Image (cartoon, rainbow, N blue to C red):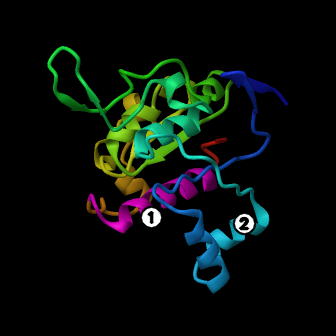
Amino acid sequence: MGFVELHGRQYRIPSHPTVVVCVDGFDPEYLEAGHKDGILPNMSSWLKTGFHAAARSAMPSVTNPNNLSIITGAPTRDHGISGNYFLDKQTGKEVMVLDDSTMYGSTILEQMANSGVRVAAITAKDKLRRIINHGLSPSKGSICFSAQNAQACTLGEHGIANVLEWLGREAPAMYSGDLSLFVLDAGVKLLQEGRADL
């Protein structure tokens, strides 16, 4: 069993399929209350049989910096994505972060893939997929796609094609709760088919 190292921390290479679920905007109090009230049975089972911990949020507390901090194990100053937008110094205009072009360094996912781990990363929205896909490649066995653009996946870019047919589901509406359920369903199916280690 080996390790990968990034930003001065070591991460164990998985010896069995390992799943990480990031629920954006999900206050730990929601989980505590849902577990106590018995309305989140699947998440409650994760508390009993998996690993759960509350972590400090990256600042600012928005999607891009936090997702990058999760997959780099580092604060925003180390990975370069400090917001969902940035100020273009040349034009003076606000620009939405839509890919990894302003990111520094590597990710845990990339380092795992470089060590032979089959990485699958699935997101709801494609703008985040284009960020977390940093350093992943189908040639390394990686799969990375979004529920938003599942109908357009190709083997060459995403490591998987014909996602809607494969999953047996229609593409969900962009701002629906079903978009996130699509992500989870796809992750479960990849695990059931033995196509991912992380």
What's the residue at 69%, 47% (across, down)?
A: 18
Residue beneath label 2, please?
47
Tell me where residue 115 appears, x and y as whole percent.
69, 23
Tag count in the figure? 2
Q: Residue furthest right?
A: 1
Q: Nearer the viewer, residue 165 or 128?
A: 128
Packing grade of label 2 (10 A; few <14, some 14-19, many >=20) is: some
Tell me where residue 12 appears, x and y as whole percent.
78, 33
Q: Is residue 186 left or right of residue 88?
A: right
Query: Of the residues tagged 1 and 2, which is closer to the observer?
Result: 2
Q: Is residue 136 visible?
A: no
Amino acid type at mark 1: Leu
Q: In the rendered view, would you say 58 is above or below 100? A: below
Quadrant position of the N terminus in the picture: top right
Tell me where residue 31 appears, x and y as whole percent.
60, 70
Task: Work out how far the residue at label 1 is from the one at label 2, CA to CA, in angstroms.
Answer: 19 Å
Q: In the rendered view, would you say 57 is above or below 102? A: below
Q: In the rendered view, would you say 28 is above or below 106? A: below
Residue beneath label 1, please?
181
Amino acid type at mark 2: Leu
Q: Is residue 104 magenta?
A: no
What's the residue at 78%, 26% (across, down)?
A: 3
Quadrant position of the C terminus in the picture: top right
- Looking at the rendered structure, the secondary structure element under dot 2 is helix
Q: Nearer the viewer, residue 126 or 61?
A: 61
What's the residue at 46%, 54% (across, down)?
A: 24
> Which range is magenta?
174-193
Q: Is residue 84 visible?
A: yes
Disc 1 and disc 2 in contact, CB within 8 angstroms: no
Helix, strand or loop: magenta stretch: helix
